[in-house]
Image (cartoon, grey):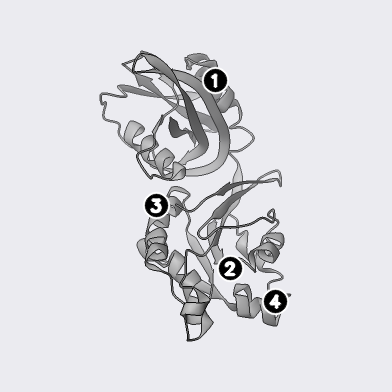
Amino acid sequence: MIAAGGVVWREQRGERQVLLVHRPRYDDWSLPKGKLVPDEHVLVAAHREIEEETGQRVTLGPSLGIQRYEVRKNGGSVPKMVHYWSAAIDGKAREFEPNDEVDKLDWLGIDKARSRLSYPRDVDILDLLDGRAEVTSSLVLIRHAEAVKRKEWDRKDTDRPLTGEGESTAERLVAVLAALGVDRVLSSDAERCAATVAPYAGAIGKKIHLHREISERGYEADPDAMRGLGDKAWRPGKVTAICSHRPVLPALARELSLPVGKYAPAAFVVAHRIADGRIVHERFGAP
């Protein structure tokens, strides 16, 4: 069983507060979380469950780890794995309406929250927040979704489009990028890259900034042309998505100070620069 949630937090009069939920079924205080629905990406699940349980809209930040424990089911026990992220509240807290799963919420300072939480494992997750909350900028580096094969395309390679499955993946990517609060979109100028991020850019009313230097032909013509892109991409206060190609991604990752690795179609890395200068990152498969 896989679930996802987060530590929802805000700054209130100079104090960091976190949001705990009370579940009447168990009479406990815990962190908001819930099970994935079929075919749901784990980031989308965390974002959805937090809003459903608390009524709050959040932006997911760095990972706060994974819990693993046993739960009762059908007279036996099954393993459960819960993914947690830092979840900064968007704007002001919204009004909460009690429901069957959660009947009360409470915003508490960190020390009071530690005492209120019913499970030591939740305290362990909460204790990781301090080192991950102060994000200065974020990046999402994406390989384009599945494209028509080169041998099946007899026109300019830069115009090679996504397949039907690739287009569906691009649509599913919308909810993932929304959960991360992406507000800036960069792409190779190749059609297959721009089309991967176009549904999301359209959803938020943003222009896609096209960069020839991170396309295959641009990189082959001048491998050094992308120098300096890292400074532009890590823009303070922004969450930037960048879409490029498999042959270009190793060099682009180095330029962005990210680890080099293999990317399947539509796979991506989420990275956050923390106030102390550290960069933390996670890799994900296609949505």
Can residue 207 be seen here? The reply is no
Secondary structure under the numbered disc 3 in the rendered image: helix
Residues under labels 3 and 2: Cα distance? Answer: 22 Å
Q: In this view, does 187 lie above or below 122?
A: below
At 39% from the left and 32% from the top, the residue drawn is 35
Q: What residue type is labelled 2?
A: His
Residue 175 disc label: 3
Residue topped by disc 1: 121
Tell whether 167 sits left or right of 237. left
Considering every residue shown, the one lying at the far right of the view is 224
Q: Label 2: which residue?
A: 245
- The image quadrant that residue 231 belongs to is bottom right
Q: Where is residue 94 in the image (x, y as percent from the top left)?
A: 33, 37
Residue closest to the eye, 164 or 53: 164
* Amino acid at pointer 4: Ala
For residue 27, above or below residue 36: above
Along the polypeptide, which appears first: circle 4 or circle 1? 1
Instruction: Judge left or right: residue 275 versus residue 39.
Output: right
The residue carrying pointer 2 sits among few (fewer than 14), some (14 to 19) or many (20 or more) residues within 10 Å by Cα, namely many
Q: Rate crowding at label 4 as few (under 14), some (14 to 19) or many (20 or more) other CA atoms within 10 Å.
A: some
- Location of residue 32 in the rendering, given as x and y in whole percent from the top left corner: 41, 29
Earlier residue among tags 2 and 1:
1
Amino acid on which the number 1 mark rests in the picture: Arg
Q: State left or right for residue 37 relative to residue 286.
A: left
- The picture places residue 244, in percent across and down from the top left corner, at 57, 67
| Inter-mark Cα distance, 4 to 2 | 15 Å
Q: Give the mark count.
A: 4
